[in-house]
Amino acid sequence: MRAEKKKTFSLSVGASSLLIFFVILTLTTFATLSLVSANADYNLSLKAVSAADIFYAADAAAEEKLALIDAELGKAAGENLTGEAYYTRGLELVAALSGVETSMENDTPVIRYIIPVTEGQELRVALTLNDPAAAQRYTCTMWKVVNTADWDLEDGELNLWLGDTD
């Protein structure tokens, strides 16, 4: 009689080659995705650095204008004027600076100026004059970046999902 042969299951060379191929394909895919993600992060960080540089350049220009305003207010304070006379003289000296607007709002002298940041943004600064006897000549009431560009939709309406799929 014939001896019965035992059937055994073994991996052949073809199956292990397929497994290695899929492992290498998976690793290559993940490496490519990591590279693309790292490149996108790098480009985003370059844009962030550029935006910060632009903002701080505008901020420095606003500080320089503030120093000029402070110098003019120092001249008015040096004339030993009080009350309305000080306010009038201070606003008169400051108004001579380019790009500076002065006004009286609710009996309070206000100084405003704008520094362009980008094409669609500007840094707006507002100061109110203090009494000449005060420790500070002015109080900064506004120092903020404002968007000036119009936001326009391409087709004129927003296509929003309202929550119903029916």
Image (spheres, rainbow, N blue to C red):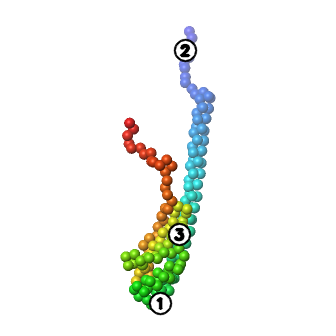
**Residue depicted at x 47% and y 83%:** 90
Which sits earlier in the primary sequence, circle 2 or circle 3? 2
Q: Position of residue 156 (x, y in %)?
A: 47, 49
Count of numbered circles on the image: 3
User: Dot 2: what SS?
Assistant: loop
Residue 79 tag number = 1
Asked if 76 appears above or below 128 in the picture, the reply is below
Report whether residue 160 is seen. yes
Task: Measuring from the top left, give residue 5's x and y in whole percent.
Answer: 56, 17
Q: Residue placed at 45% from the left, 48% from the top? A: 157
**Amino acid type, callout 1:** Glu
Whether the residues at callouts 1 and 2 have beta carbons within 8 Å, the answer is no
Is residue 133 visible in the rendered image? The answer is: no
Q: Of callouts 1 and 3, which one flags the residue occurring earlier in the amino acid sequence?
A: 1
Q: Which residue is mark 2?
A: 4
Q: Is residue 122 above or below residue 127?
A: above
Crowding around mark 1 (Cα neighbors within 10 Å: few <14, some 14 to 19, many 20+) is few
